[in-house]
Amino acid sequence: MAAQKINEAHEHIAKAEKCLKTSLTKWKPDFDSAASEYAKAAVCFKNAKQYEQAKDAYLKEAEYHTENKTLFHAAKAIEQAGMMMKEQKKMPEAIQYIEKACMMYMENGTPDTAAMALDRAGKLIEPINLEKAVDLYQKAAGVFENEDRLRQAVELLGKASRLLVRLKRLDEAAVALQKEKNMYKEIENFPMCFKKTTAQVLVHLHRGDFVAADKCVRESYSLPGYSGSEDCVAMETLLQGYDEQDEDQVYRVCNSPLLKYMDNDYAKLAISLRVPGGGGKKKKAAAAPQGGASGAPAPEEEEDDYEGGLC
């Protein structure tokens, strides 16, 4: 089967070369037909799992589409060449081809296709190179934003923000989250603005910037429905507990379903949040002996120690 496909591929290449020849009666090479034959050859090589030869055939197809001034089809062929690199587990080379294709899509006036290709490239590279994935998602978001397709743009920004948190690039994550929140506000998706405020607070507290965290909540009071909402009350409680170094209060908020069931990267920020200077003891547990009721503090202290071991 593979041998038959390889033979077919070579037949298509021979036809392509014939299309490129000129004579007394044929003054110009037939680039369109040559590109078509190389495309068929590439598919045959791909079906035979000869990915390197398939890549070369796709690049030849792209070359002749470019000669024929059909840039969109040339870009498609280059993107396919990238996919052949992916099949060989050569991810950096795959991404290079896809990025080149995206530039050609942009030049051809098809930015949406470029953005979708950048998104696909981000998904390909994410398991092995988070930094490059962030770059690709942000580029794709930028293309969609320029086209006023904010819903698509903000979704890609969200991917980038989560990866920046995973990379512990929290300063950049804070900036990215603010941009996300502004975009959700622009498209009037206020419940998502609430969620982004919560994510901002967690990021800023991990940065050790209580003032910035508090400011995010205060700014969100102007959002319709935020004041008094579950998200708002949780953040007010968290900030109060953090400011008063009340580890028990911070623990309860950070381990509540509202925060534990956020996107995984933000949930991890929540459960790993520590009160500065807490020293591993809960404020309530430390204050219990002054309560006056002897014997009463014991179960509370035991429970607090158990909670402290989990957070």
Image (tube, rainbow, N blue to C red):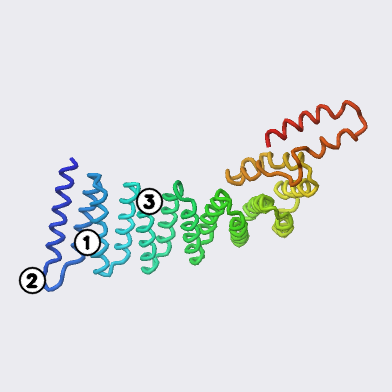
- Looking at the image, is 238 positioned above or below residue 62? above
**Total marks in image:** 3
Residue at numbered disc 2: 23
Position in image of residue 285 (x %, y %)? 82, 35
Q: Secondary structure at mark 2?
A: loop
Residue at numbered disc 3: 91
Q: Secondary structure at mark 3?
A: helix
Q: Secondary structure at mark 1?
A: helix
In the image, what residue occupies the spot 40% across and 66% down?
106
Position in image of residue 62 (x %, y %)? 27, 62
First in sequence, mark 3 or 2: give its number. Answer: 2
Given the current orientation, which residue lies at the most extreme left position? Answer: 24
Image quarter of residue 251: top right
Q: Is residue 227 left or right of residue 180?
A: right
First in sequence, mark 3 or 1: give its number. Answer: 1
- Looking at the image, is 27 positioned above or below residue 208? below
Residue 282 or residue 102, whichever sits in front: 282
The amino acid type, in three-letter code, at marker 3 is Met
Position in image of residue 233 (x %, y %)? 75, 47
Q: CA distance from mark 3 to mark 1?
A: 26 Å
Image quarter of residue 116: bottom left
Residue at numbered disc 1: 35
Residue 200 or residue 127, whichever sits in front: 127
Position in image of residue 179 (x %, y %)? 60, 61
Labels 3, 1: front one: 3
The amino acid type, in three-letter code, at marker 2 is Ser
